[in-house]
Image: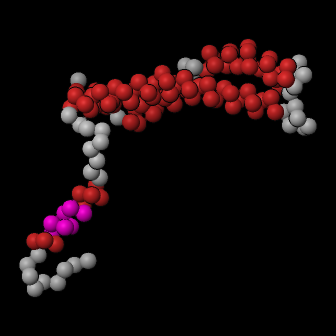
Amino acid sequence: MEGFKKFLMQGNVIELAVAVVIGTAFTAVVTGFVEGIINPMIAQLFQADDIANAQVGIFKIGLVIAALINFVLVAAVVYFALVLPMAKLKEHSDRRKGISPDEPVETDVDILHDIRDLLRAQQTPGTAPRA
C-alpha cells in the first residue's frame, strides 16, 4: 500500500490526471457555460446573431474570444479543484514526515560536488590533482 501511495504522490501522475480532467470531465460544463452565457453576450456586443458570426473585418474574433474564455475557465477549475488541493496534501504529508518546505533540496549535482571535494581532500600531498 505504501508503494501505491508513493506512486500517486509523484508529480507526473498528478500532471497526467490534470491533463485527463482538462480534456474530458469539465469540458461539457464549461462548454455549456460558454455557449449558453458567454457566446450570446459576445454576439450582442458585435451585433451578430451567433458568436461564430462576430467579426472584425474578415476575422471571426468571436470564435477566438470564446475559445480563450473556455480555456481560462477550464484551467481555473482544474487548478482550484485538483492542483491546489494536491499541493496542500503534499505539504501536509511532508510536514508529518518532518520535511521542512524551507529546507533546500540536495540535487545530484550537489552530491557529485561533495564527492569531488571529499576526494580532493583525501589526496596525499605531493600528488597532482586531477581536473
116 lies left or right of 83: left
Would you place residue 55 above or below residue 102 in this image?
Answer: above
- Drawn side of residue 65 relative to residue 72, left or right: right
Is 118 covered by the magenta stretch?
yes
* Frontmost residue, 32 versus 3: 32
Residue lying at the far front in this picture: please name it: 102
Q: Considering the whole magenta stretch, tell me its main secondary structure.
A: helix
Residue at 8 percent of width and 78 percent of height: 124
Instruction: Classify the position of the N terminus by image quarter.
Output: top left
The image quadrant of residue 27 is top right
* x and y, in percent, of residue 26 in the image: 57, 20
Farthest residue to the left: give it.
Answer: 124
Give coordinates of residue 87: x percent, y percent. 38, 30
Q: Position of residue 3 (x, y in %)?
A: 24, 30
Q: Is residue 8 visible?
A: no
Residue interval drawn in magenta: 113-119
At x 10% / y 85%, what residue is drawn? 126
Residue 73: name its quadrant: top right
In what quadrant of the picture does the C terminus appear? Answer: bottom left
